[in-house]
Each structure stands twice: as C-alpha cells, then as structure tokens.
Image (cartoon, grey):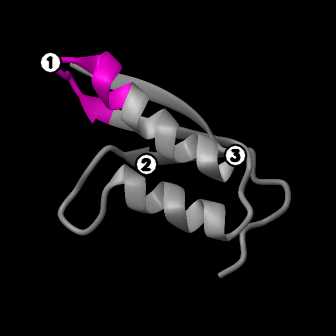
Amino acid sequence: MPLPASLELVVTPLFCKTFDALEIIEKLGAQDYRKTLRVVAPKLPNRQIVLRELRSHAARQGITIELIEEG
C-alpha cells in the first residue's frame, strides 16, 4: 500500500516477533519515505551502539531516526 504524502512520522518497535526496525527502514526507503522514523525500545545496555546502527541504515534511505527507550 502506498504511503500518504502527508505522512510525517512512523513509529515502530525496535523488534518484535515478526519484524525489526531495520526491516521497516528498508521498506520505508523502498517507498520513498524520507522523513522521521521513531523507534521505541526497551531500556538498552548501550543505546549509542543501537542508535549508530539504526542511523547507518536509515541514512542510506534518507530517513531520520529517533530512538525512545521505555522503562
């Protein structure tokens, strides 16, 4: 399904049973989404490593990453 042109923000979990944030980055990039992806994660032992990895993939797609930790 095509994304609406007015879509400014997508929110996704870092991971779940059926997909992870890296897959979402690839799918959004393939649909020419070039805005913000907010990734929600549990408390991480090393937030910076995860954020660096997500941003590395997102930068290739032109997507901005926000990482929100819960708990």
Nearer to us of marks 2 and 1 is 1
Instruction: Please name the amino acid that badge 2 sits on.
Output: Thr
Q: Quadrant of residue 52?
A: top left
Measured from the top left, where is residue 14 in percent x and y?
A: 32, 44
Residue 9 drawn above or below residue 4 = above
Say which element carries label 1. Answer: loop
Q: Which residue is mark 1?
A: 45
Say which element carries label 2. Answer: strand
Instruction: Give the class, few, some or many, for how many residues have Cα within 10 Å of label 3's Cα (few <14, many ≥20).
Output: some
Q: Which of marks 1 and 2 precedes in the sequence?
A: 2
Q: Which residue is mark 2?
A: 12
Say which element carries label 3. Answer: loop
Q: Quadrant of the C terminus?
A: top left
User: Are the residues flagged by discs 3 and 1 in contact, CB closer than 8 Å?
Assistant: no
Instruction: Please name the amino acid that badge 3 sits on.
Output: Gly
Q: On the picture, is 13 further left or further right than 30?
A: left
Gap in angstroms between the C-alphas marked 3 and 1: 27 Å
Range shown magenta: 41-51
Q: On the picture, is 60 further left or further right than 70?
A: right
Measured from the top left, where is residue 35 in percent x and y?
A: 72, 43
Q: Which residue is mark 3?
A: 62
Q: Quadrant of residue 41?
A: top left
Q: Which of marks 1 and 3 precedes in the sequence?
A: 1
Gap in angstroms between the C-alphas marked 2 and 3: 17 Å
Gap in angstroms between the C-alphas marked 2 and 1: 20 Å
Q: On the picture, is 10 further left or further right than 12?
A: right
Q: Which of marks 3 and 2 precedes in the sequence?
A: 2
Measured from the top left, where is residue 40 in percent x and y?
A: 37, 35
Q: In percent of the image, x 61 and y 41: which residue is there? A: 59
